[in-house]
Amino acid sequence: MMPAGKRLHRPYAAVRIGAAQGSAHAHQGRPAVAEPAVDLATALRNAGSPSDRAVVPQRWASWFEWAAPGVSVMVDSRIEVVPPSAWADYLVVAAGGPGTLEKLARIRASLVVVDRRDQGALLRILEAPDSGWRAVAEDEDGAVFRPAPAAGVPTGE
């Protein structure tokens, strides 16, 4: 059984951490992982809703769970709760590998956060005019993307 305040949504394996519970990864109000710029977390919190399914860099996931607790993320640092098939999908998407757009559609992702430093291929795929995605926020660390309205993917808006 999952601890109170945490829910596992299959097959997407999204993890929600209740705001009242706080993140198990936070220490003295600060996450114990590499922090992306506050602007990206604020953008995700402002652009996201409880119906959203976000793909975020795994090493930033705990930070986003803490900063935007209402948005579900695909994977986080608790690798044992994510099914192998979800990890396989995440690894392809995170690397901007073959079939990235198809995987995003299949898992019904409605937000994608890209790390400029480590995910250049994914950034190029999502920035392509025919990708079906649009940037809703950007800063020096990365960008937050949402499906373009005509893409047919729920936007959570």
Image (cartoon, rainbow, N blue to C red):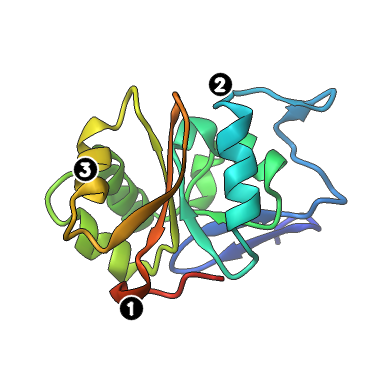
- Residue at (84%, 48%) from the top-left corner? 21
> What is the distance, in whole Å, between disc 3 and disc 1 at their CAs?
21 Å
Image coordinates of residue 20 in percent, x first then y, are: 87, 51
Mark 1 Cα-neighbour bin, 10 Å: few <14, some 14–19, many ≥20: few
Badge 2 is on which residue? 34
> What is the distance, in whole Å, between disc 2 and disc 1 at their CAs?
33 Å
Q: Quadrant of residue 122?
A: top left
Badge 1 is on which residue? 152
Q: Earlier in the sequence, mark 2 or mark 3?
A: 2
Q: Is residue 24 left or right of residue 154?
A: right
Label 1 SS: loop
Q: Amino acid at mark 1?
A: Gly
Q: Is residue 11 above or below residue 128?
A: below
Q: Is residue 44 left or right of residue 74?
A: right
Badge 3 is on which residue? 96
- Residue at (21%, 58%) from the top-left corner? 131
- Residue at (49%, 68%) from the top-left corner? 10
Q: Are marks 3 and 1 in contact (CB under 8 Å)?
A: no
Q: Are marks 2 and 3 in contact (CB under 8 Å)?
A: no
Q: Is residue 104 above or below residue 17?
A: below
Q: Nearer the viewer, residue 145 or 96?
A: 145
- Residue at (36%, 67%) from the top-left corner? 107
Q: Amino acid at mark 3?
A: Gly
Mark 3 Cα-neighbour bin, 10 Å: few <14, some 14–19, many ≥20: some
Q: Earlier in the sequence, mark 3 or mark 1?
A: 3
Label 2 SS: loop
> What is the distance, in whole Å, between disc 2 and disc 3 at their CAs?
21 Å
- The reply to whether residue 62 is visible in this rendering is no
Q: Amino acid at mark 2?
A: Ala
Mark 2 Cα-neighbour bin, 10 Å: few <14, some 14–19, many ≥20: few
Give the mark toward the camera: 3 or 1.
Answer: 1
Q: Earlier in the sequence, mark 2 or mark 1?
A: 2
